[in-house]
Image (cartoon, helix red, strand yellow):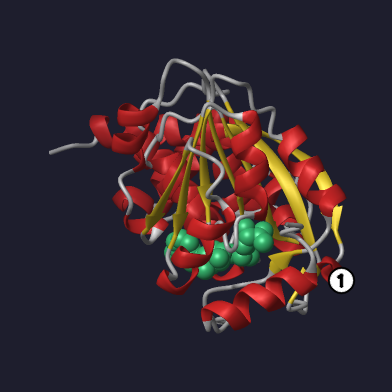
Amino acid sequence: MKLYAPSTIKELKERHGFRLSKSLGQNFLTDKNIIDHIIEDSLIGENDLVIEIGPGIGVLTAEAARAAAKVIAIEIDKGLIPILRETLKEYDNVIVLNQDVLKTDLKALIQEHGRGGKVRIIGNLPYYITTPIIMKILEDQIPADSITAMMQKEVADRIKAAPGSKIYGALSVAVQYYCTVEQILSVPREVFVPQPKVDSAVLRMDVRREHPVELADENMFFQCIKAGFEQRRKTLLNSLTGTAGISKDGIREILAAAGINPARRPETLDLCEFAAIANLMVDYTKDHQE
Ligand code: SAM
């Protein structure tokens, strides 16, 4: 069965009485080359555990099952479960869970099913929750080696943006702190059924073994980034004032110690500069505790 063929999708839908849900971001892939490319560039080894987010009718799942030791596919839509049972029946190394990935304990799954190989998270992600899914995996420090994810092109562009670019923001800094990011594919909207209104891109985010900067307190770093990008037109001095309860004079002192011009815009700062400021903020709050 050519799972990726639009005629197969149509036939499965009709036979199982399945109705596509727009609100769950259901756009199914219909291009075999793109499917192969995603699987190949996910670097799945034969001992690896793959966690797939949103298998749909199983086009990526089936290919991942051929490459990996085990695949756990997490699908929120219970209407797709009987379809997946049928399309994946020849693979005895696939577990399908009918769950919301945002409420799934991925650490526990990895602990239970990981067998010493790498852990590869893959998915053609539902657009409406791409950022929460990626940030959950990273912030919860899920022990995965990589995340290969299809997403709306604009989100991919933001994730890989460099300092100084208009689209560089908190998401770029956060993902780049945890991962190295590589775009492996551009995907036109025409290869999906139904066709979305936007183009897509696939990023492979390799989770870093060591963080690129030393942080005294990760929380402070993320507070600092959040404050920095909240109002992009403000100067660094103004946007950071009040962060962690630090006054304008305090921020001025911190920026001087970091050798960073307070009139700069936050979006010109790289990871190391944000880290330097956050570390000085930690020292400052310790020194100024009553
Ligand atoms: N992997 C399939 C493909 O490439 O054809 C389907 C991809 S489709 C863009 C996204 C899938 O994620 C849908 O099957 C949808 O039902 C599922 N999904 C949406 N929200 C989810 C959530 N919170 N947890 C798990 N799966 C979800």
Q: Residue at x 79, y 65 (%)?
A: 5
Q: Which residue lies furthest to the top in this view?
A: 116
187 with respect to 87 (left or right): right
Percent of width and height locating residue 9: 69, 71
Q: Residue 166 appears in which quarter of the rendering?
A: bottom right
Q: Which residue lies furthest to the left in this view?
A: 290
Q: Residue at 46% of width from left, 47% of height from top?
A: 224
Quadrant (top left, top right, bottom left, bottom right) of the C terminus:
top left
Question: At label 1, which amino acid type do we have?
Answer: Glu
Please tell me in which quadrant of the rendered image residue 107 appears: top left
Image height check: is 138 above or below 156? above
Q: Which residue is drawn at 54% across and 19% down?
A: 47
- Residue at image coords 75%, 74%: 193
Q: Quadrant of the N terminus?
A: bottom right
User: Are there few (<14), some (14-19), or many (20+) residues within 10 Å of tag 1?
Assistant: some
Q: In this view, does 130 lie to the left or right of 104?
A: right
Q: Name the residue under label 1.
A: 190
Foreground residue, 57 or 179?
A: 57
